[in-house]
Image (tube, rainbow, N blue to C red):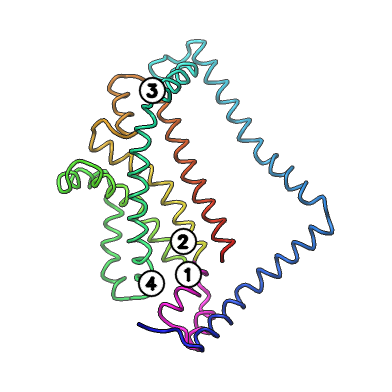
Amino acid sequence: MSVTTSTEKHAMLDVQQTYTSTQESAASHRAKESAQSPSIPRLRVMMGLLSALPPVVLTLVLLIGWYMSTAAGVVKPLFVPAPADVFASLLDGLSSGLYLSSALVTIQESVLGFLLAVLIALPLGYGLVKSRLLATALHPYLAAGQAIPVIVIAPLLVIWLGSGTLSNVVVCMLVVFFPMVVNTMLGIQTIDRTLTDAARVEGASGWSLLANIEFPLSLPALLAGVRTGFTLSITGALVAEFVQGGDQGLGSLLLIAKNQYNTPLMFATLVILAVLAALHYGSTWLLARLAERVY
């Protein structure tokens, strides 16, 4: 087991101070500007409200157009149900617990698949950057795996692993795996080499270099991959449920509604899926803010 020497500690401190000095000066500059101009926070609030106005207006326009087209009979209810029917189906599903039980299954599959992808993709992406032999050996397989749609591999996984949560988790992992590998590689490759070279000259290497220099500097790209992967994990869970069938999960609920030509149920399920995707993305946004405070 390697022990971090005093020289390595000094090297890591020097590099970290170099990296954070610009951030501290920028923060102090912003603080001075805020102190000199008390109206800046108020202007930021106003700008935030103005930026939120266009999507709100677009949503209202779409809802009004949806209501008018269905009320006038321009669109048949079989293709696009009325907003009132979708709302009634949504309330029925929430009150009966149908959406809760189905959403819990989909959330479990998406979270487990995402965590499995994190455990494999992050170390693999780091190894592909650091080892030319590993990159030469695995790059063709990664490219081929990305070229083959996951929906083609999913039936084989059901045969190999059986129908159940395990095969769905693996399918979900395959959906989010490649973007996370690419973002990990990008984060490591874009680190300023002068910082890592300075740390190595002072004696930092191995785990100490990774934990104290490379990981903090590559964190923005890693968090981008995490945010993308966690949001896509919902898609991976749905793909697995579509292939496997069954009667559990939001994907299976969509298939049941399709077979019954129950379009209000389909639209209401899509609303639940949109809420889940927003919650996934929001949780990763909070994680990114926490990481910024820590590092």
The answer to whether marks 1 and 2 mark residues whose Cβ atoms lie closer than 8 Å is: yes
Q: Which of marks 4 and 2 is nearer the N terminus?
A: 4
Q: Which residue is drawn at 36% across and 66% down?
A: 123
Dot 4: what SS?
Answer: helix
Dot 1: what SS?
Answer: helix
Dot 3: what SS?
Answer: helix
Type of amino acid under label 3 = Ser
The residue indicated by pointer 1 is 215
The residue indicated by pointer 3 is 96
The residue indicated by pointer 4 is 129
**C-alpha gap between disc 3 and disc 1:** 46 Å
Q: Which of 1 and 92 is in front in this view?
A: 1
Q: Which residue is drawn at 32% across and 47% down?
A: 172
- Rendered position, 38 above or below 209: above
**C-alpha gap between disc 4 and disc 2:** 14 Å
Type of amino acid under label 1 = Phe
Give the image location of residue 260, x and y in percent: 29, 19
Q: Earlier in the sequence, mark 1 or mark 2?
A: 1
Q: Nearer the viewer, residue 279 or 145?
A: 279
